[in-house]
Amino acid sequence: MGEARGLIVVKVRCEVQLSLSKRAGEMPASPIRKLVPYAEQAKARGIHVYHLNIGQPDIETPTPVLEALRNFGERIVAYTHSQGSASYLASLRSFYAREGIHVEPWQINVTKGGSEAILFAMLATLNEGDEILVPEPFYTNYIGFACMAGVKILPLTTTVEQGFHLPDKKAIEACLTPRTRAIMLCNPGNPTGVVYTREEMDRVAQIVRERGLWWISDEVYREFVFEPEPDAYASVLNIHGLEEQAIVVDSVSKRFSMCGARVGCLMSRNKEVMDAVLRMSQARLSAPQIEQYIATAAHHLPASFLHGMVEVYRKRRDVVFQALQAMPDVLAGRPEGAFYTIPRLPIHDTEDFARWLLTDFSRDGETVMVAPAAGFYASPGLGRNEIRIAYVLKEEALQRAMRLLGEAIQEYRSTH
């Protein structure tokens, strides 16, 4: 009657094989940043590294911006509206109006850097498996954004021999497929320094109209044009007939030397696009309050600030281009804008060369860091003999860095 009944606990071990998503597996490492550990090791050995690998300007952030940061008077760091704070949106519209770009309040949405703007543009216009045509070499992170969005980049190859300008209309159309739904241009171009002519822009506009494509325009370097065409478009938003198809992505990062602020925007005159982008913005809540506050001060700077900055980069461009021209067997075009160039080196594997610069090469305790260019291409095998140089250092430092690069190329060739 009083028989005790014991509780038997059975432990079952279930071994489950976990795997990452296909997206995670395809997400590439940044060719700009993946060699950073080697640079840090070089610095730990006492080597001074001249950074030509990343577009981080050494020009000081404008004083009014830093003063705004010091004088931020809010007692709570709070959410802002998902579209952007009212004061910052107003400053953006005024800034663009001074540049001849007129947008209504609903046609602009503040984002967390230009990066989020690019991702939102892709997510709003492209379905998984769709294609976006992009001239290569292109800003390497486009690959990452496309991977996140499930989109395939369709490369349109351009070359240093042609100054990285676009081929004719027939050649562009030959790249398109039934899955192509958008074209994306960075103008002026990162990583090439190309500035597309008005004729090239009209050529693309004709294709976009005829094919019913979206045009995503990365205009982060809009003002950085060294020899401007008198009748060039200020923006794709000013091209007649593309009101429903044009989308602009932009950022304060390079224009005001505020890369760490992470404030950008997306603009379009297409109501459905902007409604979709606003809903995406609501899902991530808001862009950062403090950064919008200080960026407002940046947009109130006089036009002379940007004119002076462009002149600084023009001089730096000349230092780099002249140095590359003097290097035996190096092929480089003359950059027309932004602050980058893609030279072709007499080296078969520039990723190995870029690593070697940090592990084995130095002169008087100094070396240089560059970005191997293969990661700026979608076509396999291209760019392996090219590098990207960001001329973001002062002229004296650039001159020394370019001398080091020339000596390194000769030594690497003789030993490899």
Image: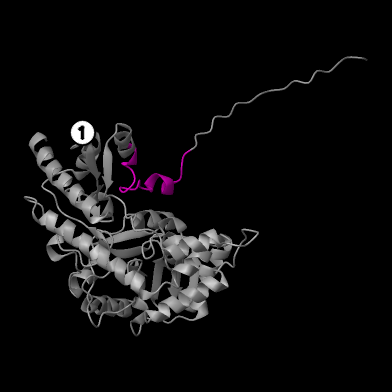
Outermost bottom residue: 240
- The crowd level at tag 1 (other Cα within 10 Å; few <14, some 14-19, many 20+) is few
277 sits left or right of 346 in the view: right
Q: How is the image coloured?
A: one colour
Residue drawn at the location 32% of the way across and 80% of the way down: 209
Q: Is residue 34 magenta?
A: yes
Rendering coords of residue 46 (x, y %): 29, 33
Figure quadrant of residue 215: bottom left
Dominant SS of magenta comes to loop
Residue drawn at the location 40% of the way across and 68% of the way down: 249
Q: Nearer the viewer, residue 265 or 95?
A: 95
Which residues are drawn in magenta?
19-37
Q: Residue beneath label 1, please?
A: 360
Where 292 falls versus 198 (above or below)? above
Q: Nearer the viewer, residue 343 or 402?
A: 402
* Amino acid carrying mark 1 in the image: Asp
Rendering coords of residue 166 (x, y %): 20, 69
Residue drawn at the location 8% of the way across and 54% of the way down: 326
Outermost right residue: 1
Rendering coords of residue 182 (x, y %): 35, 69
Is residue 317 visible in the rendered structure shown here?
yes
Where 361 falls versus 317 (above or below)? above
Figure quadrant of residue 160: bottom left
Figure quadrant of residue 179: bottom left
Q: Is residue 110 magenta?
A: no
Rendering coords of residue 302 (x, y %): 39, 74
